[in-house]
Image (spheres, helix red, strand yellow):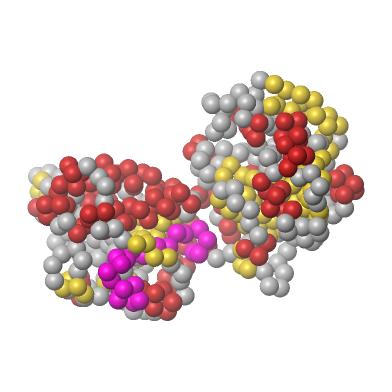
Amino acid sequence: MKLIFDIGANTGDYTDHFSKVADKVIAFEPNPQLVARLNRRFASSNVTVDKRALSSTVGTQLFHICDAPTLSTFSQEWIQSSRFSLDQNWEISIEVPITTIDSAITEYGVPDYIKIDVEGYEYKVLQGLTRCLPDTIISFEWAEEDTYIQKSIEYLQSLGYTQFFYTDGDSPCGTSDILWSTWDDLHFFSRVVPERKQRWGMIYCKKEQQVGDRKYDRWQTEYFWKYINLDSRPDRREHMEYEFARVGIHANRLQALLPTEVEQPADKLYTMQKRTPGAIGCWYSQVKVMEQALTVGKHAIVFEDDLVFCDDFNARLDVLQQYMDTHDWDIIWLGGTYHTEPTWHRSENGQHIHPDLQMCHCDLNRDWEHTDNPYIVRTYGCWCTYAYIVNYNSLQKILDLLDQNVYRSMGIDWLMILLQPQLLTFAFNPGCVKQFDNQSNIGDGITYFSTFESLGPHWYKQKL
C-alpha cells in the first residue's frame, strides 16, 4: 500500500502495524497527551502525526478528555451510555481543530486504506467523506451499544459501497484475510445485543467484488467448530479429520480433558464420579468449547470424535441456516436421537415415570413436536450432545445452567434432557450425523450406537 489514514491513532499500535505495510501513514489524533507519545514513537519514520480530529465539517470542536486518555471522544452518547460510562470520567474538555476525510484527501492524496476508531463518533467521521473511493478499503470500529452502526452502513451504501466484512476485537485484519459479502448476507445484527455492551470489533467496506477476492462463508466465519479428542485416541482423530475433509468442513481439535485434569470441588462432581467418572472429562471438554466460542464471539459447534456425517451434510446446513435466521433458538442438535415412544418426559399425576427424570417437573408428556419446517423438530428430550450448535447469544445462559446443575448430573447428555424444557432446542430430522460402534472412553467395553436404528428413519439418513 502507498498511503493509509489512521483516524484515531490513539497510542499508535495500529499505526505501527500500518507503517510496516505502507509507504506513508497519516496518524490523526487530537488528544495532546497521545500526540506527544506518537511524535516520540514515530520520529524519523514514514508516519506523519496530524493533531487534527476528523468530523463531518471543518473548524473546531469540543473534545472530551477521559481519565483513560484512549477513551477520549467527541460523542456525548458514548460518554453517557457506553460500557465505560460508570467507571470513567470525562471532566476535561478542550477545543481542537477538526477536518474531514474529503479535506484530508485533498491535502495528502487518496489513501489505499482508511481506518476509523474514534470511540462512538465513527458515523460523523464517515459523513466527512462525500464520494465513493473505488480503490480504497475503509474500516471503522463497532461496539454493541453504538446506535449509529446501521446509519453508518446506510450512509456508506448511499455512496456506492457494496461489500462488507466484520471482525471481533482489536486485531488488525490484512486485506488478504477479508471475506467479502453484502451487508445483508453478514446477518450482523443477529448476534449483536446492545444492552449487553460486551462485543466490539471492526467493520470493513469497499466498492465491489474483484477477481481473487475471498468470499464470506458464514459457516466458517460465524461458527466455532471444535471436535473433542483424547490424546490416547489417535484412531478417532484420524477418523474425524477424514470425515470433516469428506464434507468440506474445517474444524479444530480440542484436546479432551481426563477426569483427573478437571479442577472442580468434589461435591460438584460427586454424582458423575460415583456413577461414570469418564463423563467428567466429556462434560468439561464440551464446556471448554462453549467458553472459547463465547470469548471469540461465535456460535459454538461441538462434536465428539466418533461420528459419521451424512453425504448431503452441506445441503442440510443450508436448511438449518435459513431456519436459524428466522426463528429464536438456543441449541440445534445435529443428531436425531430422541425417543418417540415411550418418551423421556412422560408423567402421571405430576410424577415422571422414567427413573432418571425424577428431578424434572415438566408436564409435557412428549419429547418432540413438529415445526413449520419438515426437517426441523422442536425437542424436549433429545439425547444428542455428540454433535450440536449453541447460539452465541445463549452461550452464557447455558454455561450458567450447566454449572448450576453439574452437582446432580450423571453426564452432560442426561442433564440436557432435563434442561430442554427450559430452552429452545431443535433437532435436524433425520439426523445429520451418527455415532459408530466403538470402544468407549466413558463406560466399559464397546458402545453399540447402532441400536438407535430402532428409533426409526428420523434417527439418521445418509441422504434426504
Q: Residue at x 59, y 60 (%)?
A: 185
How many numbered tags mark residues here? 0
**Camera-nearest residue between 201 and 388:** 201
Residue lying farthest to the right in this orientation: 106
Specify whether residue 70 is in view: yes
**Considering only vertical position in the picture, is 68 above or below 249?**
above
Magenta span of residues: 219-239
Residue 93: % across, % down: 73, 23
Q: Is residue 170 left or right of residue 446?
A: right
**Camera-nearest residue between 46 and 322:** 46
Residue lying farthest to the top in this orientation: 91
Q: Residue at x 81, y 36 (%)?
A: 52
Question: In the image, is residue 227 part of the stretch drawn in magenta?
Answer: yes
Q: For residue 234, what is the image quadrant?
A: bottom left
Q: Residue at x 11, y 52 (%)?
A: 274
Q: Residue at x 30, y 67 (%)?
A: 231
**Camera-nearest residue between 207 and 279:** 279
Q: For residue 63, what is the image quadrant?
A: top right
Q: Is residue 261 left or right of residue 101?
A: left
Question: In the image, is residue 120 part of the stretch drawn in magenta?
Answer: no
**Camera-nearest residue between 429 and 373:** 429
Which quarter of the rendering shows the N terminus? bottom right
Q: Is residue 263 left or right of residue 39?
A: left
Residue 386: % across, % down: 29, 64
Q: For residue 147, what is the image quadrant?
A: top right
Residue 261: % across, % down: 26, 54
Residue 448: % across, % down: 17, 73
Specify whether residue 137 is in view: no
Which quarter of the rendering shows the C terminus? bottom left
